[in-house]
Image: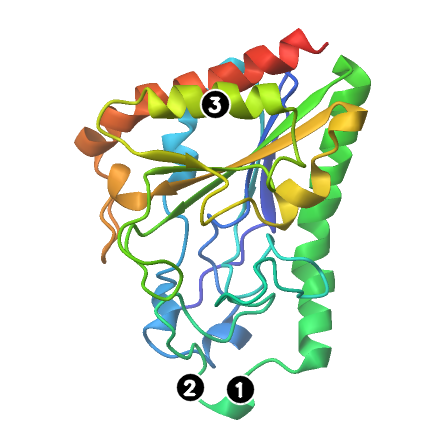
Amino acid sequence: MTATAPPLLRFHQGTAPLFISMPHVGSYLPPQIAARLTPEARQVPDTDWHLERLYGFARDLGASILAATHSRYVVDLNRPPDGASLYPGQSVTGLCPVDSFDDRQLYTRADDMPDDAEVAARRQAYWQPYHAQLRAELERMRAAHGVAVLWDAHSIRSVLPRFFEGRLPDLNLGTGDGISCDPALAQALLGEARAATGYTAVLNGRFKGGHITRHYGAPARNIHAVQLEMTQCSYMQEAPPFDYLPEVAAGVLPHLRRMVEATLAFARSRQ
């Protein structure tokens, strides 16, 4: 039996000038797309699993939270609408991906891959609503508080040879090489991340922030954006069944919370 399609997004409006976006937590595949994918792809292994649970404390801080429900295999919400590469010269997946992080084909047959018309239709049906909500909430927040800070939450397997050599640092902060937020915020977060005993951290390393961070961050308008790409081994199983591991997550959670609290403190200092 086919599962009932969920709403395109989950949105909670908070009371603080902090907005947490989770564009890659969705795992739902519409049946007309799932039928064309390989059995492995239907397991959506490249999902940012369990982030809503990991960031469960954010509601208590008054944050607004936006989470996707559909898989990034339907459309990647953190890519520009024209599909332009965010990392020219490096291997990347597309707006409507046709291959996985392990560089395996997602579609059973080549003629099952989405053509330009289907990509345009998916962009309209799935990409636009998320970004409309994101844009509207940032503007509401800025109007209400005089400032808005966007935290784009992501996670990824710690070892992915397609994208980087060796093991990825655990806490990867990205600000588009400094364009998406005030330098004071970036340095405060890097300080918190580097103080996390047992975890490694970097600012604008392999992951500098995707489309959301780079597009919506506008420090001159007092809208600041930062991305955090966490290693999944910091809180969950990186292989199927991709279970959340509470005893592992308990190690990183206090550090993550301090980073988010530092972000909120920065926001309030700019009100």
**Colour scheme employed for the rendering of this structure:** rainbow
Find numbered disc 2 in the image and state the secondary structure of the residue it sits on. Answer: loop
Image spot of residue 197 (x, y percent): 24, 22
Find numbered disc 3 in the image and state the secondary structure of the residue it sits on. Answer: helix
Instruction: Kindly report the distance in space between the C-alpha atoms of the residues bearing marks 3 and 2.
Output: 43 Å
Residue at the disc numbered 2: 108
Image spot of residue 188 (x, y percent): 50, 18
Instruction: Kindly report the distance in space between the C-alpha atoms of the residues bearing marks 3 and 1.
Output: 43 Å
Q: Nearer the viewer, residue 67 or 139?
A: 139
Q: Earlier in the sequence, mark 3 or mark 2?
A: 2
Residue at the disc numbered 3: 189
Callout 1, which amino acid?
Asp
Callout 3, which amino acid?
Leu
Q: Is residue 240 left or right of residue 27?
A: left
Callout 2, which amino acid?
Thr
Image spot of residue 218 (x, y percent): 75, 33
What residue lies at 46% left-to-right and 79% top-to-bottom?
35
Q: Earlier in the sequence, mark 3 or mark 1?
A: 1
Badge 1 density bin: few <14, some 14–19, many ≥20, Cα 10 Å: some
Marking on residue 184: none
Quarter of the image that includes the C terminus = top right
Find numbered disc 1 in the image and state the secondary structure of the residue it sits on. Answer: helix
Residue at the disc numbered 1: 112
